[in-house]
């Protein structure tokens, strides 16, 4: 298992290895801040500014992770960049269609979904479609 | 576009990984170039030709139109 993981790690490009290493701390921070966010939602005695701080804190970790991703996009080679930008473009297009469809269904009164649920599903759709299309593009050029 | 990258690399005795390091690209990129799945940009094509001490047209051959 360790040998397999090591072989996988060695097969990655230097830029991707740097990105995975760089995104480790922001990922751990995101988990910690998401837990504190969840905790703060039950603390109604907290002052409003403090509740706002806890509510938005996970975004800071996400920004840190996104900065690492942008550095990876700058450092990777041209085929990797083509794959990444292709996956991002497809994912953005899919989410745009999903957002439009959700808005139209809600506007027509055909569904009564909570806004939190719709936002969460759109986020998942973005990440999921990016991952699937990135994998497909990697296979295409393998 | 066809190319002679595999032939030139093997003549040098390099693995795909070694060529990737010399070109500062990923091994996947070298493989995609050799199999003709990906055509390089002009700057990368120049780098490849220079590495094999030739001209771009010594490495890359236009395919049938």
Image (cartoon, grey):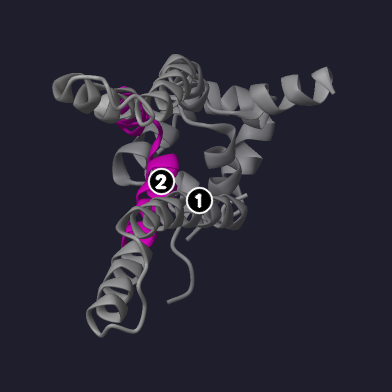
Q: Mark 1 and mark 2 in contact? Answer it, CB < 8 Å.
A: yes
Q: Residue A134, which numbered label?
A: 1
* Segment tinted magenta in the rendering: A64-92
Residue situated in front as seen by the camera: B31 or A47: A47
Q: What's the chain of the residue with tag 1?
A: A
In the image, taking residue A41 as reference, residue A134 lies left or right, namely: right
Please, what secondary structure does the residue beneath circle 1 have?
helix
Residue B20 in percent (x, y) is at 54, 28
Front residue of A91/A48: it is A48
Predominant SS along the magenta part: helix
Using the rendered image of the protein, determine whether residue B12 is visible from the camera's viewpoint. no
What is the chain letter for disc 2?
A
Residue B30 located left or right of residue B61? right
Q: Are marks 1 and 2 on the same chain?
A: yes
Task: Look at 49% across and 30% down and name the residue there.
Answer: B52
Please tell me whether residue A82 belongs to the stretch shown in magenta.
Answer: yes
Residue at numbered disc 2: A84
The image shows residue A49 at horizontal and vertical percentages of 14, 22
Left or right for B43, reference B24: left
Q: CA distance from mark 1 to mark 2?
A: 7 Å
Q: Quadrant of residue A78?
A: top left
Residue at the extreme front of the image, as rendered: A45
Taking the magenta stretch, the answer to whether it contains residue A65 is yes
């Amino acid at each position: 298992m360790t040998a397999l993981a090591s072989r996988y790690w060695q097969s990655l490009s230097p830029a991707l290895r740097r990105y995975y290493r760089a995104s480790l701390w922001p990922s751990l921070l995101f988990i910690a801040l998401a837990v504190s966010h969840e905790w703060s939602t039950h603390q109604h005695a907290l002052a409003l500014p403090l509740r706002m701080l806890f509510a938005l804190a996970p975004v800071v970790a996400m920004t840190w992770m996104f900065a690492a991703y942008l550095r990876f996009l700058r450092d990777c080679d041209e085929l990797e960049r083509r794959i990444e930008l292709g996956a991002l473009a497809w994912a953005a297009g899919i989410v745009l269609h999903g957002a439009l469809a959700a808005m139209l269904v809600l506007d027509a009164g055909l569904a009564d979904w909570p806004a939190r649920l719709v936002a969460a599903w759109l986020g998942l759709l973005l990440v999921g479609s990016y991952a699937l299309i990135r994998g497909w593009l990697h296979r295409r050029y393998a | 576009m066809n190319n002679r990258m595999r032939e030139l690399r093997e003549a040098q005795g390099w693995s795909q990984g070694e060529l990737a390091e010399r070109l500062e690209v990923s091994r996947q990129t070298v493989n995609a170039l050799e199999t003709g799945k990906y055509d390089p940009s002009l700057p990368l094509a120049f780098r490849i030709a220079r590495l094999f001490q030739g001209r771009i047209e010594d490495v890359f051959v236009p395919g049938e139109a």
